Amino acid sequence: MIAIRIPQIYLFFFIGLTISACKQGKGPDVNNIPVEVKIERFDQDIDLLTKDSLAKSAILLRNKYGIFYDDFMSGILQVGSTGDTSYYKNLQTVLHNPDYNALREEVKKVFPDMSKQNEELSQAFKYVKYYFPQQKIPRVISFFSGFAVQVPVGNEYIGIGLDMFLGANSKFYPALRQSIPQYISRRFTPDHITPRVMETFVREDMFPEPDSLNTLLDRMIYNGKIMYLLNKFLPDVADSVLMGYSREQQQWAQQYEAQVWGYFLEENLLYETDYMKVQKYLSEAPFTPGLGNAQQSSPKLAIYCGWQIVEHFMAEHRELSLQALMKNTNYQEILTESHYKPK
């Protein structure tokens, strides 16, 4: 079994724990590419486990969802291995937990239908096939887990944790502040499902971060290529959404791009190999410490600048395909040939 790749965030259901600017039509015509994504609603089918014999319904669900079922029970819900029936007891504890049932009802309320996401993801994966014809399209499966993980990637599937897309003002999120701060949960909205799924697919399935990244420049260009590619797959999604920025953060990054780049150069950060010294320019945060006034700066500024460098590079090399871009790991060459000099 291929190990599920998930960032464990938080799990709530066990005993003792309670839950107290847009771009238009920039992409090529992909209408004739035969891709149709239909999200499989495990979040709905799991109700079978409470309506029928647990043993019987568990077998039915395991047969239908395969490796995802095993990964969900053992890796996400953490009720035990599905190799034998001993996990049933822990599973029953979860299924009868009042918090589980409250969350289940909220997910049903917010997501009675996912036709919008089916359409968005179908379009996005058509672009994937347009640029990368040999790329395999994964199953897409929705679930809820008690805020354990948002978008897990497994063996030929990608999951959508619907409980982490309930809306920024969901009544459940204030209780999670210690593990999921507000600057992250503000993006837990239905409109962020497709961008989050596609970013995870690009980063985890198509082009995982190589171990060879050494300097800040390496990480800037790698992430810049990821963002450039994501933009091609979601050409009608605002840059701010792709970056995970608020409108104000997007405006700040654009306004101070030249100063940020100048700061990287003056502080000799481009070729810094100590990750501890540069991680604040790459990581999720409410702002970038040391830049801007009164905590007004945008986060992930190295990724933002990396994206702009790749944009400039591709503008200088219009003959270059996306596949060729992604194969190019000469990050210094990309910077040099981009002629990137923000003003």
Image (cartoon, grey):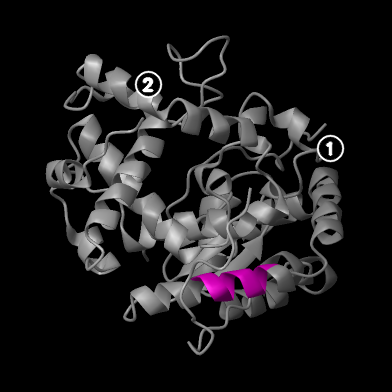
- Please provide percent x and percent y for residue 36: 57, 83
Q: Are marks 1 and 2 in contact (CB under 8 Å)?
A: no
Q: Which residue is mark 2?
A: 259
Q: Secondary structure at mark 2?
A: helix
Q: Is residue 244 left or right of residue 14?
A: left
The part of the image, by quadrant, that contains residue 265 is: top left
State the image coordinates of residue 260 (x, y, percent, origin top left).
37, 23
Determine the residue positioned at 54% across, 85% down.
Answer: 31
Residue at which label 1 appears: 171
Q: How many marks?
A: 2
x and y, in percent, of residue 16 in the image = 74, 31
Residue type, mark 1 in image: Lys
Residue at horizontal 66 percent and vertical 37 percent from the top = 185
Q: Range of the magenta residues? A: 117-124
Residue 198 vs residue 269: left or right?
Answer: right
Report the front residue among 323 and 313.
313
* Residue kind at label 2, given as amino acid type: Gln
Which of labels 1 and 2 is toward the front?
A: 2
Classified by dominant secondary structure, the portion drawn in magenta counts as helix
Instruction: Specify whether residue 138 is in view.
Output: no
Give left or right: position of 311 versus 300: left
Q: Is residue 123 magenta?
A: yes
Image position of 287 with respect to 223: above or below: above
Distance from disc 1 to disc 2, alpha carbons, whole Å, reads: 40 Å
Q: Name the quadrant of the C terminus.
A: top left
Residue 39: x and y in percent read 64, 73
